Image: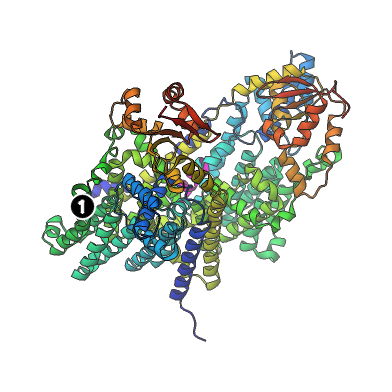
């Protein structure tokens, strides 16, 4: 019988890891996406449904009316690539809330594949095992990578782009340059914030090949730059000048006041460590010094520098939106390759039983992580919420103009209740505006502006109402409370 | 520039001594943070158990104290005997000089732990080199769980420190085979076992591993040093156990400790892993486990294998306590630090080989400092609890009850808070956790009958665990339906058992 070589065992091991990575991401997939940044996930669901209904002319007119109004309200931020893909899938299998999450999970696994291929390119297959282990089984990564957000696809494309960039750095052919440009452009098109990490890494790779002057004279470099920038430039031109809604995405994003506050940097540092895992974070930073491969070193240093500038540009969101840190996981995973190579390569000199024992220890660790993530997922069940939002939507009526004070920007009521609420600002919204230097409007004026033309004021977050006593007393003293339960209040603004 | 770099990179032993000294000092200083807060931040039951015993010893020898107070302190300190009251004796003797301050115990525990760090550094350096030893020491001193647990008033920090000293002596003995190190090993190990005998698993495992690895069974049986070590290990504990058995003071020590049924439950192992990750971090513990396989077959592996097998046995024997009483995990910290050092050695060798310059070294130092600062910050966060107000709360309840009343209670820490600050004893009623542990042990108890027995002849029933009270509706209804409420606030209820509304 032919003996199975070590490469086959490694591939089998990696295959097991990918299967386990997919398995844990599909666990409890039919639950509602309330476990992780639900506002952003419901926004994706609403947009996907709107696109789906455009493909569904036989649907009732009122549903078309609602989905179109919701599409308008959601506005354009990134190109709705994932939403479009989900809508087409709905067309084939019907509308299911889990479809987007399955795609995100698959994209993330594809990102893991790019990591593995990169490790082969840099001659660090053993390090690649550690990188894939980390990337697929970090608890934060498991949760975030099955969310209906553009970020998992962005991170996956970012890793593919880094792989292509590295190959271009090594081979310097037009073919590899073309691939690098296409993948860099695709990643940035999916979510433009990828530009920070990718620009940093690209600069690192280019400079690792020679001085800046030489790079500027290199036509392939300009080819990559052109291919990278073109899709995003076209999209922004379309969004700003044709659709006209894209300009709004830049408001309330930049908070220079935070940059002067030292506690911002401490909080950022602590958050980055917590999300990426302390051991991995520090080991990865040292990984830069473990490789003699200048191109890989450039990728890592450039990627880290890009992550730093990304944090400077989105300071507020960096502290409040965990998923902004997802690209860091990709960079940390790459940084772990040189370290993993040192430790795991040592094991290749062991006898087979010791190699097997190490593999079992690693698999045991994976099983433990998977089990913990599974427990977190199993601990909650949000499905029971559906009838509540559906019934509330039915009571309000799809064509009733109303304003809502909620804890989720009205996303669940919109999605399950088939209504189009206008949102009253939460306390957090008011604070973020103040942080951005906007002066608050007098309450009367604010109320008039927001409630103009509205028939009802629906409150679905009672704690949020407690946070705004002025609103509460104003509503109580001016409008009749026509419905009250333990979960919501409805004021009639017409009387 | 090169000359400057060479000058800066020249090996300087005093620099390592300085680094270790500063690290130990920093570790000690961190443990003094919020020193005077009450010891309720970690394993409060165990800490107050020791506090009550120490106070009883202190009042026993305190001149010019009200006799009634003295006798009450001694009565309240009669909480039972598990381990020899070494920490309690040291603390109570110090109180004679400083007055009664609970934080004195924290200083001793911290000091013992930090001294153990010195032994750990020397031990890892013996196995590997300075850098892995320093990183191991940083883990030992700054792992957030370790910071909180190692300053608690209980024997475990001292036990762990003595255990580390014993391991150091063991490795020195392995490398020198001298009588000096055999005797030191026997003395340190014997002391560790005396302080708390649960260390027998890991210490026994380590010694067995090293002896079998370096001598083999046949030679070990004929080796005088091995017998001397065994004798020194066992003698103090045997004397204490014999004395305890004869006087009956160790009665009950072994009840509700052994839960073999948990071994068959996969959830037990997942919980165990969770605890390990909580104590040392997942990545670190995985790398430590890998250390067993990476280690040299003669030099480190016998020690590591013995230690890990001992740890596994320890966990299997104390299965329930292993995931409910986190302080059982304190010896895991030096174990992980030692196991990690093998991988770290490999890591540092490659690092200096590939990045020999000054800048990588500065980056390395910067990252090590940043990592330590982060750990210290997390530890500081965990030390931030504010419990000082509790003393007045329990004193108020003690005053309400009169200090000499006969009381049954559903209260915090088996009534130890009430006993310590309220100067009032009470017979604790079961919490849900107590019922669970008895269920796990396969005991069938008629809880209603037990409740009637426990409250028979009592004047009051005190409830401070209001959530727990709600979880036991039968007991709650029984009390409300049959006894008048003597005092009720938002935080506690006292039922008057002497004047029942009707016969239950």
Residue B31 image point, x, y percent: 53, 33
| Secondary structure character of the magenta stretch overall | helix
Spot the residue most to the right: B503
**In the image, is B259 to the left or to the right of A473?**
right
- Kindly indicate the quadrant of the structure image that contains residue B58: top right
The residue labelled by disc 1 is A238
Please say which color scheme the image uses.
rainbow
Residue A107 image point, x, y percent: 39, 61
**In the image, is B355 to the left or to the right of B327?**
left
Q: Is residue A251 visible?
A: yes
* Viewer-proximal residue among A225 and B5: A225
Residue B23 image point, x, y percent: 46, 39
Residue A195 image point, x, y percent: 26, 52
Task: Work out whether A78 lies above or below B104.
Answer: below
Task: Work out whether B236 lies above or below A492.
Answer: below
Residue that appears at 31% across and 29% down: A449
**In the image, is B239 to the left or to the right of B91?**
right
**In the rendered structure, which segment of residues is drawn in magenta?**
B132-141
Residue that appears at 23% across and 64% down: A169
Crowd around label 1: few <14 · some 14–19 · many ≥20 (10 Å): some
Residue that appears at 65% across and 43% down: B325
Is residue B158 one of those drawn in magenta? no
């Amino acid at each position: 019988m032919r003996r199975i070589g070590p490469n086959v065992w490694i591939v089998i091991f990696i295959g097991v890891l990918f299967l386990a990575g997919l398995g844990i991401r599909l666990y409890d997939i039919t639950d509602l996406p309330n476990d992780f940044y639900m506002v952003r996930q419901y926004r994706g669901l609403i947009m996907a449904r709107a696109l789906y209904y455009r493909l569904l002319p036989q649907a009732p007119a009122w549903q078309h009316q609602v989905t179109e109004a919701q599409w308008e309200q959601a506005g354009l931020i990134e190109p709705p690539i994932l939403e479009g893909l989900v809508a087409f899938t709905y067309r084939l299998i019907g509308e299911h809330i889990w479809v987007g999450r399955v795609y995100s999970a698959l994209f993330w696994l594809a990102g893991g594949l790019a990591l593995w291929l990169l490790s082969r390119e840099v001659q660090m297959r053993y390090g690649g095992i550690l990188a894939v282990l980390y990337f697929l089984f970090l608890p934060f990564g498991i949760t975030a990578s099955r969310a209906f957000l553009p970020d998992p696809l962005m991170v996956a494309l970012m890793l593919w782009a880094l792989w292509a960039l590295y190959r271009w750095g090594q081979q310097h052919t037009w073919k590899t340059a073309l691939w690098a440009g296409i993948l860099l452009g695709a990643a940035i098109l999916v979510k433009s914030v990828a530009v920070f990490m990718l620009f940093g890494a690209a600069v690192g790779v280019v400079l690792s090949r020679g001085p800046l002057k030489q790079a500027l004279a290199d036509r392939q470099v300009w080819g990559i730059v052109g291919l990278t920038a073109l899709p995003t430039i076209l999209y922004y031109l379309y969004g700003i000048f044709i659709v006209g809604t894209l300009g709004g995405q830049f408001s309330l994003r930049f908070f220079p006041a935070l940059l002067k506050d030292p506690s911002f940097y401490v909080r950022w540092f602590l958050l980055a460590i917590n999300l990426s895992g302390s051991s991995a974070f520090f080991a990865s930073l040292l990984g830069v010094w473990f490789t003699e491969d200048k191109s890989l070193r450039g990728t890592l240093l450039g990627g880290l520098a890009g992550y730093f500038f990304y944090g400077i540009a989105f300071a507020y969101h960096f502290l409040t939106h965990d998923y902004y840190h997802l690209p860091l996981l990709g960079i940390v995973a790459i940084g772990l390759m040189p370290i993993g190579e040192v430790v795991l390569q040592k094991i290749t000199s062991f006898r087979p039983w010791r190699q097997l024992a190490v593999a079992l220890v690693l698999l045991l660790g994976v099983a433990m992580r998977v089990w913990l993530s599974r427990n977190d997922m199993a601990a909650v069940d949000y499905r029971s919420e559906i009838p509540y939002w559906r019934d509330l939507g039915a009571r309000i009526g799809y064509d009733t103009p109303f304003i809502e004070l909620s804890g989720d920007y009205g996303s669940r009521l919109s999605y399950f209740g088939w209504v189009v609420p206008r949102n009253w600002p939460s306390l957090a919204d008011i604070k973020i505006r103040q942080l951005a230097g906007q002066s608050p409007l007098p309450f009367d004026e604010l109320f008039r502006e927001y409630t103009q033309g509205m028939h009802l004021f629906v409150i679905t977050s009672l704690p949020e109402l407690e946070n705004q006593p002025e609103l509460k007393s104003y509503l109580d003293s001016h409008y009749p409370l026509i419905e009250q339960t333990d979960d919501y209040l409805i004021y009639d603004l017409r009387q | 520039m090169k000359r400057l770099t060479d000058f800066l990179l020249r090996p300087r032993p005093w620099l390592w001594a300085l680094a270790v000294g500063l690290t130990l000092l920093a570790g000690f200083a961190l443990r003094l943070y919020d020193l005077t807060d009450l010891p309720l931040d970690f394993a409060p039951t165990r800490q107050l158990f020791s506090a009550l015993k120490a106070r009883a010893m202190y009042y026993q020898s305190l001149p010019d104290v009200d006799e009634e107070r003295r006798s009450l302190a001694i009565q309240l300190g009669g909480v039972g005997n598990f381990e020899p009251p070494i920490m309690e004796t040291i603390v109570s003797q110090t109180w004679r000089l400083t007055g009664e301050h609970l934080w004195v115990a924290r200083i001793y525990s911290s000091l013992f732990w930090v001294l153990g760090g010195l032994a750990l550094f020397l031990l890892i350096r013996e196995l590997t080199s300075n850098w892995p030893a320093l990183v191991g020491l940083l883990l030992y001193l700054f792992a957030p769980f370790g910071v909180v647990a190692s300053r608690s008033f209980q024997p475990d920090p001292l036990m762990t420190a003595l255990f580390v000293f014993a391991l150091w002596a063991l490795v020195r003995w392995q490398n020198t085979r001298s009588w000096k190190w055999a005797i030191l090993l026997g003395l340190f190990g014997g002391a560790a076992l005396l302080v708390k005998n649960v260390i027998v698993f890991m210490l026994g495992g380590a010694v067995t591993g090293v002896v079998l690895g370096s001598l083999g069974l046949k030679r070990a049986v004929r080796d005088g040093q091995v017998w001397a070590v065994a004798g020194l290990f066992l003698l103090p504990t045997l004397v204490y156990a014999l004395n305890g058995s004869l006087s009956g003071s160790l009665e009950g020590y072994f009840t509700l400790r052994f839960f073999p049924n948990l071994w068959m439950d996969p959830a037990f192992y997942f919980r165990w892993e969770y605890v390990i990750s909580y104590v040392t971090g997942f990545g670190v513990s995985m790398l430590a486990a890998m250390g067993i396989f990476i280690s040299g077959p003669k030099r480190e592996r016998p020690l590591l294998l013995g230690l890990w097998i001992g740890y596994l046995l320890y966990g299997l024997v104390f299965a329930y306590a292993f995931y409910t009483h986190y302080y059982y995990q304190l010896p895991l910290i030096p174990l992980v630090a030692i196991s990690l050092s093998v991988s770290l050695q490999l890591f540092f060798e490659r690092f200096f080989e590939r990045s020999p310059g000054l800048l990588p070294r500065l980056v390395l130092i910067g990252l090590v400092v940043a990592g330590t600062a982060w750990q210290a910050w997390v530890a500081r966060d965990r030390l931030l609890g504010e419990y000082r107000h509790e003393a007045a709360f329990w004193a108020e309840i003690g005053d309400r009850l009169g200090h000499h009343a006969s009381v049954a209670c559903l209260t915090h820490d088996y009534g130890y808070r009430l006993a310590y600050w309220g100067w009032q004893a009470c017979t604790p009623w079961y919490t849900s956790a107590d019922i669970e542990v008895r269920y796990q042990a396969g005991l069938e108890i008629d809880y209603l009958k037990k409740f009637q027995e426990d409250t028979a002849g009592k004047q009051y029933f005190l409830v401070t665990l209001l959530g727990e009270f709600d979880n036991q509706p039968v007991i709650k209804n029984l009390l409300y339906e049959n006894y008048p409420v003597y005092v009720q606030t938002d935080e506690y209820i006292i039922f008057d058992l002497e004047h029942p509304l009707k016969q239950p």
